[in-house]
Image (cartoon, grey):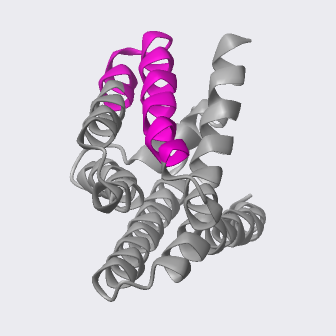
Amino acid sequence: MIKVFINLLLTLTGIAYPIIWLFANNQQMLFHLPWIMAVLWAVKGCFQQQGQRYFAWSIALILAVVAFTRSIETMFWYPIIINGLMLSLFGSSLWSEQTVVERLARLQTPDLNEAGVRYTRKVTQLWCGVFIVNILITGAAIWLKFYDFWALYTGVISYCVIGVVMAGEWLVRQKVKQHYE
């Protein structure tokens, strides 16, 4: 139950982070949010398995550094760091025996056939592309100092894109499963 609550809080704070930045009249509030998120990620790490634990603690450490610097500029990089970590996690799995998506798929289908394995590899590549696009768009917004767009993209648009990719992938997966069954 605690894991679910922590994940919910992390999701809400992750979405709220850029939105709060956009509408914050008091910059002091901005400096508290990374600390809150760092604590949430650290607590999440305590409830994770070993590999995921280090991932959560790494994010907590990065957020603590962001909070410690008390620099608005470093706060812009949080979405890029998260997307970069996800890209490295998903991307590096393309060179391992099982991709991240295949591992997740095997939780529901332990005896995944060869077509399923190929499909999960393509889905892993798709997610790598999503993370790269997020990094490029967010980086361009920072570089061009389009901070309102940064807040809109990282707080709303990127989550909509992720939702569309997840829904689209689910629909395609149903067709692929029907084809091979």
Main secondary structure of the magenta stretch:
helix
Q: Position of residue 114 (x, y in %)?
A: 47, 54
Q: Nearer the viewer, residue 33 or 1?
A: 33
> Residue drawn 58% across and 43% down?
105
- Whether residue 48 is visible here, answered yes or no, is no
Magenta highlight on residue 69: no
Magenta highlight on residue 48: yes
Please state, as top left, top right, bottom left or bottom right, where the C terminus lies in the image. Answer: bottom right
Looking at the image, residue 1 sits to the left or right of residue 78; the answer is right
Q: Is residue 26 above or below residue 135?
A: above
> Residue drawn 56% across and 75% down?
153
Q: Nearer the viewer, residue 125 or 51?
A: 51
- Count of number-bearing discs: 0
> Residue drawn 37% across and 62% down?
76
Q: Position of residue 68 (x, y in %)?
A: 27, 35
> Residue drawn 34% across and 77% down?
142
Q: Position of residue 159 (x, y in %)?
A: 64, 64
- Whether residue 95 is visible here, answered yes or no, is yes
Task: Locate residue 160: give its quadrant.
Answer: bottom right
Q: Start and end of the magenta stretch?
A: 28-56
Task: Locate residue 12: give its quadrant.
Answer: top right
Q: Position of residue 154 (x, y in %)?
A: 54, 67
Looking at the image, residue 36 sits to the left or right of residue 145; the answer is right
Please state, as top left, top right, bottom left or bottom right, where the N terminus lies in the image. Answer: top right
Looking at the image, residue 7 sits to the left or right of residue 38; the answer is right
Toward the bottom, the furthest residue is: 144
